Image (cartoon, rainbow, N blue to C red):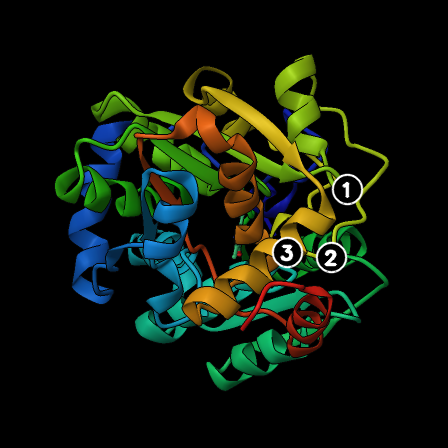
Amino acid sequence: MDGRYEPVESPDETTVFPYHDLTPPTTADVARARKVVSRHLPETPLVRSETLSAALDADVYLKREDTLPTGAFKVRGGVNLVASLDPEFRERGLIAASSGNHGLSVAWAGREFDVPVTIGVPEKANAGKVAAMERLGADVVSYGPDYDTAREHIESLAVENGKRYVHSGNEPKLLSGVGTAGLEIVEELPEVDRLYCPIGGGTSAVGYCLTVGALTDADVVGVQSAAAPAMYRAYHEDTLEPHDRMETSAEGVATRVPFALTMGVLRDGLADLQLVSEDAIHESVARLFVEERIVMEGACGTSVAAALRAGDDIAGETVVIPVSGRNIDRAKLDAALADYDGVA
Ligand SMILES: *Cc1c(COP(=O)(O)O)cnc(C)c1O
């Protein structure tokens, strides 16, 4: 094999290959991605939340990314990346490591474009997400106790088999594809004042910074769990060091290693990056189910929790919260509901 399948020096603690062009995407790249994404995926509804609007005395809108076919926003990026895949990889296939929704995105896009897909998951991955990946035809490899162990295994497989390693953050095509959600918001609700975005690896926040942040007067505010604050620390302390703590139960925002490409955009693009507690996340998930019958993952509970905490500070504003995904593990939803003391 030639050097194309050997890792190159990485700007962060993750592995990148020579085909990872780490040039940050622009707003124009998102506009280009829109043409591709709109051929394969529907636009998602932007719906006023009556309960959150009343609670906050604000106009709160939910961007229903949970209505996409994989149940999460990431498929926008997968479609954009696989649509322009280098022909040499169409037969070799794609390989990725994922706790769930990134893998589902790559699996969905692989099926759409007829490219074989291998996904590495940690042994205790969300069973529903694993079953969904297999249903889409992906070859799922369970490996190791946590995401990073699975990721390292997949990265070494990519060196051996020459498949296209789809990194979960250092991929301009994923970022510009994911950004198409923000263009939809700009068109429908240009008066938006503030958007709260959950942050795991930071791809969706980059998408919103390049669109809602760049094209309107809105502030894009990132939110992480206090139990997994790697990107929070990267943003506030200007470092790309991995964090030693990652204890959130919300796997969509369970990041230990900050990514160079996303952080590079977020440093200037975000108005702020905040932390919320695990309790506040669980309460938000339960609240949206009880009050609106919306099923959301803990990952989006972060944004709801940050908006609720802001209280009077955002009264009178037009606020958008993406429902980034609905693939919550049944036991986690049950536990959040059992702890919730609001009335059903
Ligand atoms: C991946 C994910 C996030 C976090 O997105 P990043 O782009 O990794 O920051 C939030 N919510 C859900 C449901 C996710 O799957």
Q: Which residue position holds label 3?
A: 283
Secondary element at tag 2: loop
Residue at left 51%, top 31%? 310
26 lies left or right of 281: left
Sequence-wise, which precedes: disc 3 or disc 2? Answer: 2
Is 32 in front, or is 280? Answer: 280
Residue closest to the eye, 123 or 292: 292
Would you place residue 187 above or below residue 290 in this image?
Answer: above
On residue 227, the disc is 1
Q: Residue at x 45, y 19 (%)?
A: 271
Task: Check disc 2 and report the residue beneath it.
Answer: 249
Mark 3 or 1: the one toward you: 3
Count neighbours of disc 3 (C-alpha within 10 A) and say few if under 14, some if 14 to 19, many if 20 or more: many
Whether pointer 1 and pointer 2 mark residues with C-beta atoms closer than 8 Å, the reply is yes
Q: Residue at x 17, y 33 (%)?
A: 190
Residue 84 percent across, percent down from the top left: 30, 52
Q: Is residue 114 above or below residue 184?
A: below
Q: Position of residue 252 (x, y in %)?
A: 60, 54
Relative to 66, is 33 on the left or the right? left
Tell me the kind of residue under disc 2.
Ser
Rendered location of residue 5, percent (x, y): 60, 47
How far apart, in angstroms, are the residues tagged by discs 3 and 1? Answer: 15 Å
